[in-house]
Image (tube, rainbow, N blue to C red):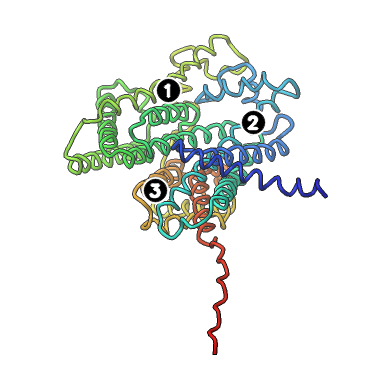
């Protein structure tokens, strides 16, 4: 009997400790509290357990053998080389002292996917409560219920992405995409941290560096650059103004260099793709001009903007790992990147067909319909409805949370619809299977919105216990 009582009291002890930790964090004024980190670790462990249980035991189809061999010898995989992932996966070929190389590299993929889900839980646990605190009528739950709500909703949001059909498919085999999504999610998390403390720019600079690493792992995520710049704009209007100005200058430099014949590889850029670049440059110019008028200032944050560009550039220097690795002549030595021609061939993905973005409105509408079907079937229709809840209460949020929601919206539009237009997939079954993996990057934002929607819903339906009032004394007759 005593053992049963002790067993039943364990959850209460855990909740009591969590309450003490939450109170201590409020005193220390930390951003990510220990309750949020508990949600991170719980989600990571749960997702990793599911991935390891379903992990492919050996080499699978497609590029699994190529990636495994490239990681084993730290070589040069097929374009664009994946230098950061190669080093990351190579570490896992040395850490587990058992099983085959393909399984060990698969573990690295599973770990990357699980940590991605944990970071989503971290952001949901903290961001959801910030939204509730800023809306009158929602901050009415007790501390114990708040802790339970944050942990559960954070876990559900992380699990929503972790067991997304398209993401799960690549998280249990040897693949580079989960590590790419991990870097993207970490970038968003660092920007969120910076947005709530704009004076602490180390988080902004770290986000820029991590995004540069993301580009070394997938050039497809160059499409989200404009969305991340809008994210920065909502965090600091003046810094966003300078970054949009840098966009205009870079576009002008590319046009002039191409005109003078210095950018020979720009010949591979199609007319449609060039139109997209010009459109982004024009949009950046309009935003820059509007912010100059709004702030009545210019170039007051040029140092911060310059450091952001420098951090991205430093991360992109990881590409020079390829010629160094190529000099050792590993078994996977794609394009012989130790030569100038081979290096630029790998860097510009020379063996692949040139990108040809969508140029027809009717075709683009069909692709959007296909995206909706993929999101509903792979991510989940119920989660999509929950993701709409934060926008129903957007007008009631504080300015800081409203900025965060709108920043995520800008990132989502780039990851979903701009990427869809640039990939220009066929809408048949084959095109859908080929493109659905890339679209899981947009599901990261959907998972964050889903978790925040769950916290809002849970807070709204949770009512404080009503104490029964004492019965009134009857008056004497």
User: First in sequence: mark 2 or mark 1?
Assistant: 2
Helix, strand or loop under label 3 = helix
Asked if residue 324 is positioned above or below residue 106 in the image, the reply reads: above
Helix, strand or loop under label 1 = helix
Q: Position of residue 43 (x, y in %)?
A: 61, 41
Q: Which mark is residue 162?
A: none
Kindly give the residue lying farthest to the top in the view shown.
328
Name the front one of labels 1 and 3. 3
Residue at numbered disc 1: 316
Helix, strand or loop under label 2 = loop
Name the front one of labels 2 and 3. 3
Q: CA distance from mark 1 to mark 3?
A: 32 Å
Q: Position of residue 22 (x, y in %)?
A: 53, 42
Residue at numbered disc 2: 174
Q: CA distance from mark 2 to mark 1?
A: 24 Å
Q: Is residue 345 left or right of residue 240?
A: right
Determine which quarter of the picture holds residue 64: top right
Kindly give the residue lying farthest to the bottom in the view shown.
477
Residue at numbered disc 3: 401
Asked if residue 8 is positioned above or below residue 477 in the image, the reply reads: above
Q: Position of residue 102 (x, y in %)?
A: 69, 26
Q: Is residue 237 left or right of residue 207?
A: left
Taking the spot 57% from the left edge, 70% from the top edge, the residue there is: 468
Asked whether residue 302 is in view, the answer is yes
Asked if residue 148 is positioned above or below residue 192 in the image, the reply reads: below
Q: Position of residue 181 (x, y in %)?
A: 52, 36
Viewer-proximal residue among 372 and 353? 372
Q: CA distance from mark 2 to mark 3?
A: 38 Å
């Amino acid at each position: 009997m005593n053992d049963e009582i002790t067993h039943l009291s364990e959850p209460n002890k855990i909740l009591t400790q969590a309450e003490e930790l939450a109170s201590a964090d409020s005193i220390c004024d930390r951003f990510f509290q220990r309750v949020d980190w508990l949600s991170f670790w719980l989600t990571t462990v749960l997702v990793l357990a599911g991935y390891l249980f379903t992990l492919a035991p050996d080499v699978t189809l497609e590029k699994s053998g190529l990636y495994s061999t490239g990681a084993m010898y730290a070589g040069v995989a097929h374009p664009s080389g994946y230098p950061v992932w190669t080093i990351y996966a190579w570490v896992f070929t040395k850490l587990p002292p058992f099983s085959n190389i393909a399984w060990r590299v698969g573990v690295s993929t599973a770990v990357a996917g699980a940590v991605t889900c944990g970071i989503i839980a971290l952001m949901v646990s903290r961001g959801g409560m910030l939204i509730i605190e800023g809306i009158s009528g929602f901050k009415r739950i007790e501390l114990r219920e708040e802790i339970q709500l944050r942990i559960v909703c954070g876990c559900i949001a992380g699990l929503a992405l972790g067991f997304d059909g398209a993401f799960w498919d690549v998280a249990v085999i040897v693949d580079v995409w989960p590590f790419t999504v991990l870097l993207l999610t970490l970038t968003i998390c660092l920007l969120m941290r910076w947005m709530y403390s704009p004076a602490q720019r180390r988080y902004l600079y770290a986000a820029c560096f991590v995004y540069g690493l993301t580009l070394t792992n997938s050039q497809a995520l160059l499409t989200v650059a404009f969305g991340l710049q809008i994210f920065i704009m909502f965090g600091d209007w003046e810094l966003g103004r300078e970054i949009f100005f840098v966009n205009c200058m870079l576009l002008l430099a590319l046009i002039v260099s191409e005109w003078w014949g210095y950018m020979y590889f720009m010949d591979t850029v199609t007319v449609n793709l060039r139109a997209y670049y010009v459109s982004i440059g024009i949009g950046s110019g309009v935003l820059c001009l509007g912010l100059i008028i709004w702030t009545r200032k210019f170039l007051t944050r040029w140092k911060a903007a310059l450091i952001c560009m420098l951090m991205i550039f430093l991360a992109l220097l990881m590409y020079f790992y390829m010629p160094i690795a190529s000099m050792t002549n590993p078994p996977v030595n794609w394009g012989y990147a130790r030569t100038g021609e081979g290096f630029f061939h790998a860097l510009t993905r020379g063996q692949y067909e040139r990108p040809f973005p969508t140029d027809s409105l009717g075709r683009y509408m069909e692709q959007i319909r296909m995206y909706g079907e993929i999101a509903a079937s792979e991510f989940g229709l119920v989660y999509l409805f929950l993701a709409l809840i934060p926008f129903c209460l957007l007008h009631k949020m504080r300015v800081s949370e409203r900025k965060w929601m709108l920043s995520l919206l800008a990132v989502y539009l780039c990851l979903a619809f701009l990427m869809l237009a640039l990939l220009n997939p066929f809408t048949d079954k084959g095109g859908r299977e080929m493109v659905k993996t890339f679209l899981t990057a947009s599901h990261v934002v959907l998972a964050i919105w889903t978790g925040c929607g769950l916290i809002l819903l849970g807070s709204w339906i949770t009512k404080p216990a009503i104490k029964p009032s004492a019965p009134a004394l009857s008056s004497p007759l």
